[in-house]
Amino acid sequence: MNSIIKGLGLVLSCILAASCSEISFGDKFLGNQPESSGATTEEMFSSKINAEKVLTKAYTGLPYGLPTSADFKLGENILESLTDLCYSFRDNISDGPVKLYYNGSLSANNVPRNSAYRYGNKSDWTAIRYAWLYIKNVEKVPDMSANEKSERIAEAKVVIALCYFEMLRYVGGVTWLDHYIDVNEPMNFPRLTFAETVSKIVGLLDEAIGANLAWKASSADDGRMTKAGAMALKFKVLQWAASPTFNSDTKWHPEADEYTCYGNYSAQRWADAAEAGAAFFAEVDRQKEYQLIQPTEETHRARRLAYRQAYYNRGGTEILISTRQGYSSDIHGSFISQRYYSGPTLNYVNMFPWEDGSDFPANFDWKSPSKQPFFTKGEMVPTRDPRLYENVACPGDTYCNGTTAPVYLNHADYKNGSGFLIMKHILQEANDRSAPVQWSHTRLAEIMLGYAEVLNEINGRPTDEAYRMVNEVRQRVGLSELPTKMNHDQFLEAVLRERALELGFEEVRWFDLVRRNRQNDFKKKLYGLRSRGNDLNHPTEFTFEKVELEDHYWATNWDTKWYLAPIPQDEINKNYGMTQNPGW
């Protein structure tokens, strides 16, 4: 259990001895890492302002989807590089996708920091530690009202639930700490089953939802957990649990056990997710504070900017859970500096429809196109879904520093890759990145599309409400409605594609492929695009060539064991109760 305890804090024993330099205070809510100053437990909870700093420390351990200096996940690469949306070309010793996944070398004896998830060594445990510390001691604070304490305890419970959901998605059932650990307790923390873990997470969220928790944070408290966030997270947990990989009579792996799935199918699990979704949207309708951000005018540019505001800007009417590792755009500096080494695939680009919403043809003639795939010749008017350009730097678009994206062969700064670059969070101009940054962990569009999927499952076909949810997301960016009279499978494919388009590079695709058991998407051939412009710096038309990207290990050696991360063997050897995942 030692590394878990270290994850919970290197100084658990001295905390309980009431003095420790690890527990220390910073000056700003969700600001920088607290400075080393030392404090006893009594001092920590001697006032509201001090207690707030303990809860703040819990918030700083929440998962963050972009590479930062605080987390070496995937060697500062992104999770989408393990999916069909993106491909890594950064073949250096620290690159997680290339060195651990594309060659299949990840193993239980080799789970380094640059893996996608290393159980026992993640900041989740830091967040859980400080949240339970807060819950245990906040009643001591003299200058907080009972209502304030109730609300902050509910916040802390959502923080804990979010961290455990992160573990559930990466490893299945986990060791569960449901109180503040005393150093004199036996180090016996058996792994919970998948079902027990889901139930515990939902239980925490139900407690938070039923408490005195604000529906939406005020501008002064933006970033705190809210009732809306808790209800949305509950839906996501139940959607995950109901999905076919874990909710099936057929095991997702020959060695799958009660720790990694239910072991049977129950329609009630989909019904539970539907009930949570219905409750969330009923409260949204009643409270009137959350809605999709709409364009200021019916132009391509305005639609693109509305979509940007939905995921990039703090606050607003769409972000349900926002995690932070700081204020300045410098927090994303390592992601931006590595921008040339991971590229969206042509597979992903081809998912985006034309600007009117009609599908981009699967048999598009790249050598002699009858219609330009990205911009019209000469005038350079966009031809596709506005979200394409906000997710992907396409040939002809402005990128990062106000210059033309270096994705075509005759660009002076061209870097070999997929022929595309990631646009989301990097954006077009330095001034675009002047706003305070965040990770939009959960936003309204994701819950709308997820609820549409769930309604399709429990009814065996898409309902009017399911269509409405998807169509509203599409209409925000000017696309036509989905065709009517789809069957279950057709609508499911449409929803999963819409989730990829709307939520690209927001750490949704990997989890969608895992929970829906989409083995073929992990094994598929991936493609890139070679483009050549008619001008070095300001091309107004291009020629194209579709090319195959290099096959990786999964193309011919796929194993569903990759759905869940291996538990480091040295963690299991400590004998506190964790077990290995299937296939590892």
Image (cartoon, helix red, strand yellow):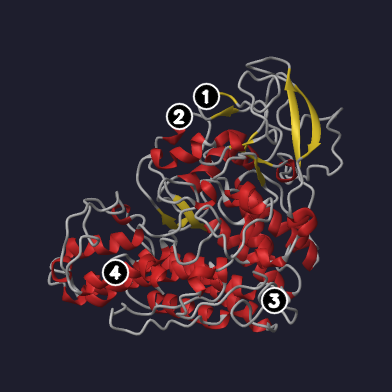
* Mark 3: secondary structure: helix
Q: Earlier in the sequence, mark 3 or mark 4?
A: 4
Label 2 Cα neighbours within 10 Å, binned few <14 / some 14-19 / many ≥20: few
Real-space Cα distance between discs 1 and 2? 7 Å
Does residue 160 appear left or right of residue 529 in this picture? left
Q: Which mark is residue 402?
A: 1
Q: Image quarter for residue 142?
A: bottom left
Q: Residue at x 58, y 40 (%)?
A: 92
Question: Splitting the image into 4 quarters, where does residue 155 fall?
Answer: bottom left
Compared to residue 528, the image places residue 107 above or below, namely below
Q: CA distance from mark 2 to mark 3?
A: 46 Å
* Residue type for callout 1: Gly
The amino acid sitting under disc 4 is Arg
**Amino acid type, label 2:** Ala
- The residue type indicated by label 3 comes to Ile
Question: How far across and down, in percent of the image, does residue 234 sit?
Answer: 50, 72
- Please indicate, yes or no, whether residue 299 appears anywhere in the rendered image: no
Q: Which residue is mark 3?
A: 458
Q: Residue at x 64, y 52 (%)?
A: 82
